[in-house]
């Protein structure tokens, strides 16, 4: 499974658990518009860390938190293996 | 002599009570003949009036030495097996120790302790002695980091709850405990065995659970006590099937409904009760209605134990509490009114109080305070869960999130793991605030339990 589909699948799973109705997850959708609160994002980052072994937001001290779904996915895609 | 009679342990033993024993995995010692025998090489007289450190590698000799020393030594300090040796010097200074009872005399030869007495089996013949004084019993607190605190008790305080219950009806009980008798929970059981005229079967940390249960059966154990973690381990092991105790007791940790129901199912013919006690607060009460928590009517003054809830924590005043912390910089044990603050947080729901966790065990989730025990109690209600542990994990988003490690019940089909995880999360979402719902649930084979029998909470 590609990194992108792992991320999207995790987002959809958490949305289901949290009763969040997601809009279409296009790359330019702002994370704010996903309907996720900070707790939902915290869950997402923790689960992706367990699944992929990386937490791109902790690795780098100065990493800016992504603004869009596309940025978020790329943060995982761009982690050096 | 003192204005009232002083009872020591030896005064509860007599040659008329036949067939009483205390045993471990290796030896069986008769308690019937104990008054004319010694584990101290007949050197008890030298320890009269001394402040004695009891530092032995096994419980059997420790228990026998306690019987001899009580009423003779000025004070005795019990060392649990997991005591960090680096703390010994501080404890010796704080307790004013001037004698040690040990099975490793060579280790003590070059230390400053002036009198070293070796405890040894088999027992030797000795001249019976008479109780001279009320010995102060010093115990160490568990679960604190750094040098443990020394807590001062008297035999009268330690046995207050046992004496209040009165003599047991029916045949003399055979007591056992998963605890070590050098800790408060285990010592209570040792004392119950002595005072009740019964026998005692000691635990052994190196023994496999199935062998331990076989030994409990061989000695016809009728009464047994342990922490909920001890009991969950036994239920998971499958070794409980052959065991039929009359009375099953839990203490030392929160007994949630899941473990009470699990024990009732495993031991349908036994009484199952949970007791509330701590090294400092002594024995508060026992709950025998099969339900978690305790009736709100227990607050106030009940059988000489006064309880109140202040700032959410249970406070206890009674003659069974410890009388002081001992040492050079010892803090006050009670508040100005004589109440011990247990640090156990309770919550009133309906007409019952429920334990939600330790004040010091709170984890911080995005600035909100969470008791891991409260989350575990909800997870444990799932029929396929045997045991769980909630903890915090760092999060770059909220600072912290709740994660849970879960042990599934024996024989759970691993293919159902995802389904069970979803059900647990559903259960948590309906019963807990959203920040308390675990972000991640991990299924594990085992969870660490401390030497004191409590779920290890190293990050709490």
Image (spheres, rainbow, N blue to C red):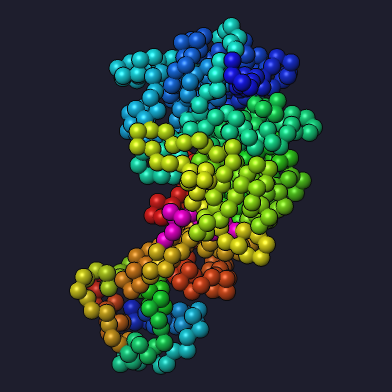
Residue B333 appears at what percent x and percent y?
46, 41
Residue occupying the point 63% across, 65% down: B349
Is B86 left or right of B430, judged from the image as shown? Answer: left
Residue B438 at x, y = what percent? 47, 68
Q: B303 or B363, which is in the foreground?
A: B303
- Identify the magenta region: B354-363
- The C terminus of chain B appears in which quarter of the rendering? bottom left
Q: Is residue B97 above or below residue B352?
A: above
Which residue is at the far right?
B170
Examine the rendering and report whether any part of residue B212 can be seen: no
Q: Is residue B364 above or below residue B200?
A: below
Viewer-proximal residue among A20 and B420: A20
Q: Which residue is at a point 51% across and 72% down the rendered structure image?
A: B433
Q: Position of residue B94 (x, y in %)?
A: 37, 30
Find out whether residue B390 is within the magenta segment.
no
Q: Is residue B162 left or right of residue B114?
A: right
Looking at the figure, which quarter contains the N terminus of chain B?
top right
Instruction: Please tell me whether the stretch drawn in magenta is mainly helix, strand or loop.
Output: strand
> Which residue corresponds to the image point at 50% horizontal and 59% vertical from the top-left?
B311
């Amino acid at each position: 499974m590609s990194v992108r589909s792992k991320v999207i699948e995790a987002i959809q799973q958490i949305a289901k658990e949290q009763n969040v109705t997601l809009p279409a997850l296009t790359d330019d959708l702002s994370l704010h518009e996903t309907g996720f609160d900070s707790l939902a994002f915290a869950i997402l980052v923790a689960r992706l860390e367990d699944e992929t072994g990386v937490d791109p937001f902790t690795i780098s001290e100065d990493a800016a938190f992504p603004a869009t779904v596309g940025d978020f996915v790329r943060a995982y895609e761009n982690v050096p293996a | 002599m003192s204005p009232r009679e002083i009872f020591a342990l030896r005064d509860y033993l007599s040659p008329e009570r036949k067939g009483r024993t205390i045993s471990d995995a290796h030896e069986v010692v008769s308690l019937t003949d104990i008054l004319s025998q010694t584990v101290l090489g007949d050197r008890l007289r030298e320890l009269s009036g001394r402040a004695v450190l009891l530092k032995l590698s096994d419980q059997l000799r420790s228990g026998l030495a306690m019987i001899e020393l009580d009423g003779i030594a000025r004070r005795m300090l019990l060392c649990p097996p997991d005591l960090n040796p680096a703390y010994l010097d501080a404890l010796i200074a704080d307790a004013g120790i001037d004698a040690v009872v040990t099975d490793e005399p060579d280790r003590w030869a070059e230390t400053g302790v002036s009198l070293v007495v070796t405890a040894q089996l088999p027992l030797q013949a000795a001249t019976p002695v008479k109780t001279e004084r009320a010995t102060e019993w010093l115990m160490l607190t568990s679960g604190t980091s750094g040098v443990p605190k020394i807590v001062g008790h008297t035999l009268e305080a330690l046995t207050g709850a046992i004496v209040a219950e009165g003599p047991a009806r029916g045949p003399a009980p055979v007591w056992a405990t998963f605890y070590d008798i050098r800790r408060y929970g285990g010592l209570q059981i040792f004392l119950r065995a002595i005072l009740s005229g019964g026998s005692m079967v000691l635990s052994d940390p190196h023994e496999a659970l199935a062998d331990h249960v076989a030994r409990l059966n061989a000695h016809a154990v009728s009464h047994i006590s342990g922490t909920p973690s001890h009991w969950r381990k036994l239920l998971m092991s499958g070794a409980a099937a052959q065991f039929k105790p009359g009375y099953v007791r839990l203490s030392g940790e929160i007994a949630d409904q899941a473990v009470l129901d699990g024990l009732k199912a495993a031991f349908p013919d036994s009484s199952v009760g949970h007791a509330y006690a701590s090294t400092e607060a002594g024995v508060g009460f026992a709950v025998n209605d099969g339900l978690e928590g305790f009736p709100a009517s227990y607050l106030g003054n009940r059988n000489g134990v006064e309880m109140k809830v202040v700032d959410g924590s249970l406070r206890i005043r009674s003659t069974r509490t410890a009388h002081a912390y001992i040492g050079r910089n010892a803090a006050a044990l009670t508040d100005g009114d004589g109440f011990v603050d247990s640090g156990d947080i309770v919550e009133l729901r309906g007409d019952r109080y429920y334990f939600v966790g330790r004040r010091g065990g709170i984890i911080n989730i995005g600035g909100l305070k969470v008791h891991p025990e409260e989350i575990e109690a909800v997870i444990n209600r799932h029929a396929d869960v045997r045991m769980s542990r909630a903890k915090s994990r760092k999060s770059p988003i909220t600072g912290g999130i709740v994660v849970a490690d879960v042990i599934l019940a024996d024989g759970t089909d691993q293919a159902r793991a995802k389904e069970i995880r979803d059900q647990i999360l559903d259960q948590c979402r309906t019963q807990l605030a959203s920040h308390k719902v675990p972000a991640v649930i991990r299924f594990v084979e085992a969870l660490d339990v401390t030497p004191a029998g409590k779920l290890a909470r190293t990050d709490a």
